[in-house]
Image: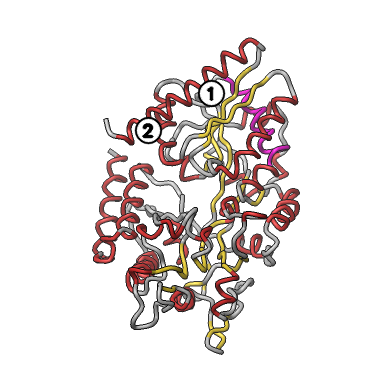
Amino acid sequence: MNKARKFIMLAVALVTALTLFQGALTAKAAKTVVTVFVGLGTGTDPLQADTQKAVVQKFNDSQADIELKFNIVDNKVAADALSTLIASGNAPDIVGPVGFGGANSYPGQWLDLAPLIAKNKVDLKVYPDALINLYKEGDAIVGLPFAVFPGMIYYNTDIFDEAGLAYPPAKVGEKYKLDGKDVDWDYDTVAKVAALLTIDANGKNSTEADFDPAKIEQFGFIHQFGSIRSEMSTFGGAAVVNKDGKVVFPDYWRAEVKWLWNGLWKQHFIPSQTYSDSALLKPNEFGSGKVAMARTMLWYTCCIPAGKDATFKFDLGVAPSYKGNTFAPIDADTFRIMKASKNPDAAFTVLMYLLGEAELDLTTTYGAYPARPDLQDAAIKAKAEKFPSVTHWEVVPDMLKYAAVPSHESDHPNYLKGKVLFDTFRAALYGESGKDMDVDKALDKLQADVQAVVDSAKK
């Protein structure tokens, strides 16, 4: 039995044991136990633990009928752990925060909330119709809006100041000043700026002839905690499968992957996986203070050292454009009740708490923007207090207008197997063998492999 398998079995055993132990304790108090499985998305970072504990404690102290329990499982094994729990008949009541990608991995497993919404007279008008529609599957409602995470640029102001370069724009369409000229804030400009900000041990940047890519001490750019589909969507969204059932990668996806390859292996302004795994870029790439720009989602504010732990200043800029258009991949997470829950009414009570009284605390620690408009100003205020160096919070709502459509987590037949193929491709691109990759041939193979898993779902 390999180590990964042992780790998964241990995680499942631990979650099951904790659940049973909690059930034994609460049975004496005649309480219904509602378990929330955390691990498919955010919520596993140690910096989030205190807030989650406080949310659980506050609920449990508020009433005597339900005992709420968060079971947190490492992201690396969470998907396998949840699958095992479902198969063994020990499915949790609620899973979350989970995005569409994580939810797509468990088709048919989510409870239709429509009857419970009607039974409890929940007013859905507090949410924009567009957000409610995201969670509709025919007449069923499998989730309610909770957190949205607009994509944007995080930039280290200390690095830009040291280099004497202008900051990224805070408004879409605003020009960038480079070499005394106004230029478009597009991915070509990002590549030029990132190359200037990538520095080796001898103080040379990656545009200089004697730059040493084996001894880089500072990088110019990264897609922080990226997936290849979200990265490709920065040049434009697209469905994996078209209306005819064919997998076709648009030209702009191929252009984006070639842009990535150039940044990784020719200009070296993007860290390879080897560098990402090194001590240089701990606790994470941008959070190390050794990366000038990160394109990622708002949730990343969960994982940047703040307050007395902050080692650098940063601010927010708008996503760059591609061929005159701006595309900002956006994540949307929520808590979902499992169809296998043995306590759906109690689980719905907990869900309304998580998406109600607890939403602002949770979305703040998750680095999210609340789906409820009445909480959004307070969310930005809380972030501003935590990160006083950020002066351009207006970027957050602005980027919601430029969501890449369809979502980079849009579903397709055999989604989980397809995701493995996309993840494997990204690992190869960022791995050391990526420097020898023929991008077009590799994408052709990926396209054919995804088509095969899509076709197998039809059979």
Instruction: Where is residue 178? Give x, y as percent.
Output: 53, 84
User: What is the number of the mark on residue 341?
Assistant: 1
Q: Is residue 32 above or below residue 98?
A: above
- Above or below, 143 relative to 332: above
Quadrant of res 348 = top right
Residue where numbered disc 2 is placed: 7
Secondary structure beneath label 2: helix
User: What is the x, y in percent for residue 13?
Assistant: 43, 24
In the image, which is nearer the foreground, mark 1 or mark 2? 2
**Quarter holding the N terminus?**
top left
**Residue stretch in magenta:** 343-359
Marks 1 and 2, Cα distance to the nearest angstrom?
25 Å
Give the structural element (helix, strand or loop) at label 1.
loop
Earlier in the chain: of badge 1 and badge 2, it is 2
Furthest residue toward front: 202
**Viewer-closest of 130 and 341:** 341
Which residue is found at the position 57% from the left and 86% from the top? 182
Which label belongs to residue 73?
Answer: none
Give the percent coordinates (x, y) of residue 440.
27, 66
Q: Residue at x 24, y 63 (%)?
A: 441
Residue 188's image quarter? bottom left
Q: Amino acid at mark 2?
A: Phe
Asked if the magenta segment contains residue 198, the reply would be no
Q: Are marks 1 and 2 in contact (CB under 8 Å)?
A: no
